[in-house]
Image: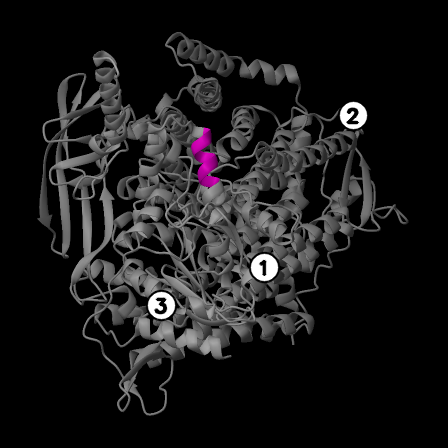
Amino acid sequence: MLPRTSVKTGLLAGLAVLLALLAPLLVDVAPARAQDGEFELPPGVTWDQVNSIAHRMYCDVCEGIPLDECESVTCRLWREEIARMLGDGQTQDEIMDYFVERYGADVASLPRSTTDRILAFAVPAAIVLIIGLIGALQVRQFRRRGRQTGEIVRRSGSGLQARPVPEDVDPAYLERLERELEGLES
Amino acid sequence: MSENQLTEHPPQQTDLPDWLEQAAGGPPREGAEPVQQRFSAFGVTAMLIIVGLLFVIGYALYQRNQSTPTEGPAPEFSVTVFDIEQLNRRGERLNLADFRGNVVVVNFWASYCLPCRDEAPVFERVWREYQDQGVVFLGINTDDIERDAVAYMAEFDITYPNAPDRGGRIEDQYRITGIPETFVINAEGEISWHIPAPASERELRAEIERALQS
Amino acid sequence: MIAEIGIIATGLAFVAAAYAIVAALVGMSARRDALVTSARNAAIATFPLLTVSCGLLVYAMLDHDYSIAYVWQTTDNNTPAFYLVTGLWGSQAGSLLFWSWLMSGFTFAALLLNWRSERRLMPVVIAVTMATLGFFLILNNFIENPFERYWVTPETGRIQPALFAPDGAEVFHPADGNGLNPLLRHLGMVIHPPMLYLGFVGFTIPFAFAFAALATGQLGSGWLRATRRWALVAWLFLSLGLLLGGRWAYDVLGWGGYWGWDPVENAALLPWLTGTAFLHSAVVQEKRGMLKFWNMLLIITTFLLVVLGTFATRSGVVSSVHSFAESEIGLPMFTFLGLSMLVSVALLAWRQERGDLRGADELDSVFSRESFFLLNNWMFLGLTVVVLWGSWAEAITTILVDLGLRDTIINLGPDYYPPVVRPFLVGIFILMGIAPLAAWRRSTAERLGRSLIVPTALAIALMAYLVATDTDSPWALLGYGLVTFAGAATLVEIWKGMAARHRRGENYLAALLALVRRDRRRYGGYFIHLGMVVMGIGIIGSSGFQKTTMQTLNVGERLALGHYELQHNGLYEAQAEDGRTMIVARMAVYKDGELVANVRPRRDIFMTTDPATGMPAPGTNMSIPGNYSTVAEDFYAIITHWTGNTVTFRAYLNPLISFVWMGGIVLILGTMVALWPSRQPDAVARKLAVPPESVGARAGGGD
C-alpha cells in the first residue's frame, strides 16, 4: 500500500503531465488566422522587421517587384511566413537562405552564397579594371604624343604631317588659330 | 548632268587651303609614314563582345519564347515528398525516371489557389481508383508555404505523394503558365496530355485510359 | 474605311522607306544626283503618310470604332477623351506606330535642315534613317498592325482578329471596348512614354550622320556640328522621360521611391549615360579635333543601347514590372539589333584600322580640360558596363546553368547597384567640378589647384558641419561633400565671368544675362551641372536617410515616424465617375505634436467582369499615397491592407526628395538655355562649308 502523500503527488504529477499534453489544444502557440482569415503577427514581431527582410527579396509570382511591395496573394503569404519565422526566432540570414533554397535563387536580391556574391561583384570589378588599364594606357599614349614640344602633329587621312611651329608663339594665339583651323576642316 | 558633287572634295588629300599650307611650309612630304595597323585590336575585341552579347540575348529570347511542352519526352526531375505522419511518409526521394513503365499524372498546385481546391477531391478519387493499375499521381506544390500545403493535403485527405518544388526548378522545366496545371505522362515517359486549367473528372479518366492503352 | 486607309498609308510608308534606301545607295555609288534627291523625297514622304496613319487610329479611338482590335484593347465607352487620344501609345501595336511616326518626323526635319550643308553625307544618312524606320515599319505592317479588325463568320459565329477578311466573314463591331490598364490612366504615365520615345528616336539622327561620316570618310567635325543640337534635344527628352517616370512612380505607384533599378529602367538609363558622355566628348572634337574615335564609339553605343533597350522592354527577356504582353516582335527586333551591332562596329573598326580616325590625339598636360574630358568618357563607360552587368547577369548565368557549368543563377537586384555605382559617381562629380576650371591645352597642377581652393574649402566646411550634426553615414558625407564641391566650382566659374563684366561697368544681373546670351552652350551646361548637383543632394538625402514603418491602426490610433505622427481618422468608400471604387483613409499628420496636414491615401479598385461568372468583380487595385510634402522632406503614407476600419499603413519619410524634382527642373531649363539658337559660330562654320556645293552648282547646274 502506497503512502497517501505519494499517491497525491503521483496524481498531481499525472494531472500536470496530462495538462501539459493538452496545452497545445488550449493555448494556440502558433499565430492563428482569425475566423475571417486575418493574420496576426506573432508577439514581438513588427511589420518593419518583416519588411526589412522582404525588401531584399523578390516575389516569384509578380515579376520584378520587391517582396515588401508586392500585393499578390502569394507575396502576402510569404510575408506572413517570414513573420512566423521571425516569431520562431530565426535570423534574417536563416530566413533568406530558406526562401532561396525553397523557391530558387531569383527570389533574393543578391546571391546568398558568399562565393556567388563575390563573383557577382568581381565580374564588373574585373571589367572596370581592364577598362581602367586601357584608359590609363591611352592617357599615357596621348601624353607622350603631346610632349613633342614645338611641333603640332596633325594627322589626316592616312598621312602623317608634321608642321613645325616656332617656340615663341603666344599660346592663346595658337589656340585661336587652332580653332579657326577646326572651322575649316570638313 | 551636273558634275558629281559627291566626289568634289576627295577626302584623302590635305584639307587646308593653299595660303595656310604655304605658311606651314609647303605640301606634305611624299613618302611620309603611313599610319596603318595590321589588325584592329578594338575591332577584334568589339566583335567578340558583340557576338557574346548576341548569344546571351538570343538565348534569353529563345528561352522566353519556349512554350509549355505538350508532347515529347517529359522533363526529368526528382523531388523529396512532404513529411506526412499519417501516411508514413518521411521525405523520400522520388525520381520521375523511377516510374518509367507506369502512367504518371503530374499536377501543379498551391494551397491558396482556389481552382486547385475544386479539383483536389477529383484527383484523390481518381487516384484511388487507378492506383492498382499502376497509375502514379504526383502533386507538385509551387510557391507555397509548407505549413499551408500540409494543411491543404489534410483537408482534402490526399494520399498520393506530394512534394515541394525546391528551387522552383520543376515549374521552370515544365514552363507552367499558372496553377492548376496537369500533365499526363505515358509509360514511355512522354507527355500524353496537358491542361493549363482545372481538370474535370471525365477528362482526367479519359486521358488516363488513353495513356494506359497506348 | 478607316482601317483600309490606315493599312494603305502604313504600307506606302514602308514602300517609300524601302525605295529611299535603294535609291540613296544606288544614287551615291552611281553618282546620280537625281536618284539621291528622289530618295530624299521618298524619305520625307514617310512623315505625312504616317501622320495619316496615326491620325486615323486616333480618330478611330475618338469614334469608338471597336471593330479595330487595337481600339477595343485600349479603350472603352467610359474612357475620357484625353485618354482616347493618348491611348495611341497605350499598347504595343499603337506605340510602335507612334514610334515610327516620331522617327519619320525627326528624319523629315533632319533631312530638310541639313540637305545643303551636309550634302555629302546625305545618301548614307537617308539609308540609315530609312533602314531604322523601315525595320519598325516591318513591325507596323506585318507583325503588329494596329489596323487589324475583328471579323465574324456568320455561319459559325466565330470571331477572329485579322488584317484582311477571312472567307465569308464580315466586320464585327463590338459594343464596348476592353479599356485601358488602369495603371496607365495617369498624366505622368501618359507623358512618360512619348518623352522616352522622343529621346530614343532623337539619338538615331546623330547616329545616322556618324555612320554616314564613317561610310563616306568625311571624318572631320561636320557631322558633329550638324547633329550637336539633335543629340542635345534627344538627351533632353530622355532626361525628361526618366524624370517623369520617377515622379509618376512616386506619385501613383505607392512604393515610396522613384527609382527601382528595374531592368527596363536601366534600359532607358544606359543610353542616357553614353549620350551624356557623347555630348561632353563632342565638345573636345569641335575644339581640339581629338577624340574622334571616342565620339564615334559613343554615339554608336548610344544607338545600339537604344535598340537594345527597346528590345528588352518589349520582348520580355528581362523580368520587370514594365512587361508588355507577349508578342512576336522579339525575333525581328533581335535580328535588327544583331545586324546593327555587327555592321556599325565593323565599319568603325575598319576606319580605325585605316587610321582615319586619328585626330589631334595628344595631351599637353594631364591637368588640361581635354584630359579631364577623356577621363569623363572612361568614367561613364565604366558606369555603363556595371549597370549592364547588373541587368544581364541573370541571363548570362542562366546559360551557364543550362550548360551545366553552374548550379544556380545569379540574380542582381537593387542591392547590387548602389555599391558599384557610387565610385563612378564620385569620379564624375569630381570631374564636374574640376573640368570647367581647367584650361585647354597647357595647364598646370598649381593653376588648377589655385582655382579649386574655394570649392574644396566649402566642401570640407560642409562635411565638417554634417559630422558635427551627427550625420554618420560615410557615403552620405562624401556625397554631400562632392556635390558641394561640384556646385561651388560651377558657381565660382559663373561668378568669375560676372565679376569680370561688372568690373567693366555692368551690373551683375545684366552681366549674367549677357554672358548667357554670348555663350549659351557653356552657361546652359553650367546650369545643367547645377541641376545635377541639386538632384544629387536630393538623391543622397532620400535614399540614404529614408525611414519607413508599417503598422496596423484602428480608428484614432497613431503611428510615429521620425518627428511625425500619423493618425487614422476613418475609412470611407467612394465612387469615381469612371467606375472606380475608392477606399479612402482620412489621416491627420502631426509634426512635433502639431497638426500640419490632412492626407487621404487611398486604394482605387477598378471593377472588371469576372469571366467565369459574368458578374462584376474587383480587378486592378492601385495604391495612391497621401503625401505631405515640404522642401525639407516628404511624409508619405499608403494603405497596404484593410479589414473593416482597421487599416495597415506604410509610412515613408523621404528627406530632401523635393530637391530631386527641383534639380530636375533646373536641368531641363539649363538644357533649354543650351539649345537656344545663338547667332555667331554656327553661321560662320556653315558659310565656309558651303563652297564645294556651290562650285558644283555653278559648274553643273544644280540639283
Q: Please state the total of marks drawn on the protein image.
A: 3
Check disc 3: other Cα within 10 Å, few if <14, some if 14-19, many if 20+: some
Q: Marks 1/3: CA distance? A: 43 Å
Q: Which residue is mark 1?
A: B58
Tag 3 subunit = B
Please state the chain letter of the residue tagged with numbered disc 2 in the rendered image: A
| SS for dot 2 | loop
Q: Percent x, y for residue B170? A: 49, 55
Residue under label 3, please give it: B126
Q: Which residues are magenta?
A: A93-100
Q: Which residue occupies 56% across, 50% down?
A: C395
Disc number at residue C45? none
Residue C434 lies left or right of residue C170; in this view the side is right
Nearer to us: label 1 or label 3: 3
Between residues B173 and C64, which one lies in front from this camera angle? Answer: B173
In front of the other: A100 or C668: A100
Q: Residues within 10 Å of mark 2 (few under 14, many from 20)?
A: few
Q: Position of residue A143 (x, y in %)?
A: 74, 29
* Foreground: disc 2 or disc 1: 1
- State left or right for residue B161 relative to residue B31: left
Q: Residue furthest top?
A: C468
Image: C8 above or below C240:
below
Question: Where is mark 2, residue-wise?
Answer: A167
Q: Is-magenta flag for residue C161?
A: no
Residue type at the position of mark 1? Gly
